[in-house]
Image: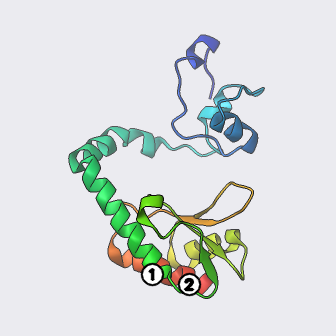
Amino acid sequence: MWGKPLAWAEVTPTIPTFDQQEYFAWMYDQPTALPAGRLETPGGFHSMEHRWALREAFEWRQQLGRHAVERRTHELVERLKAGLDGAKHLALATPRDARLSAGMVMTVPYRNDPGEVVERLYDRHRIVASVTPYRDAFVRVGPSIVNDEDEVDLTARALRQLS
């Protein structure tokens, strides 16, 4: 992406790049040596559909209401954590206590690399997960208002099977 130097001061990244140097500069609000456009164009793909839908997505989310979204997210997260209870080949890294967790569930697979688990979740079940970008890698999933109970249950079964 190209822009005049004065214009870049008016631009805020919506979706950060996947370039690690730029990502960490963005994450920690540090200056970067690369041109500003690198922060605005993530990983070589264009997310125009996402950007075009932002207004409608925010309107829909506001219609649902903050408390309803929070309540539903917590219900689904608690369901997923319950579905992972007693798993032999993974540990739940997210605290079981609902007061200490929010919308993400992280697990530690004992037998497999987290990246392999994420890849298999998608390849075999079309479940989108990620590996945390931290020193200790976890498999991370985030049930949300666009998921239903069957999808959460499938995710629990798949994690138990693939970890």
* Amino acid identity at mark 1: Gly
Q: For numbered disc 1, what is the local secondary structure?
A: helix
Q: Position of residue 2 (x, y in %)?
A: 63, 24
Q: Is residue 145 visible?
A: no
Quadrant of res 26 = top right
Q: Is residue 76 visible?
A: yes
User: Which circle marks residue 83 in the picture?
Assistant: 1
Task: Tell me if mark 1 has few (under 14), some (14-19) or many (20+) residues whose alpha carbon lies within 10 angstroms of its own.
Answer: some
Task: Tell me if mark 2 has few (under 14), some (14-19) or many (20+) residues whose alpha carbon lies within 10 angstroms of its own.
Answer: some
Q: Residue at x 68, y 70 (%)?
A: 114
Q: Are marks 2 and 1 in contact (CB under 8 Å)?
A: yes
Residue position for label 2: 160
Q: Residue at x 70, y 29 (%)?
A: 30
Q: Residue at x 40, y 71 (%)?
A: 78
Q: Position of residue 67 (x, y in %)?
A: 27, 51
Is 1 situated left or right of 14 in this image? right
Is 111 situated left or right of 7 in this image? right
Quadrant of res 87 = bottom right
User: Which quadrant of the figure contains the N terminus?
Assistant: top right
Q: Position of residue 43 (x, y in %)?
A: 65, 45
* Amino acid identity at mark 2: Arg
Q: For numbered disc 2, what is the local secondary structure?
A: helix
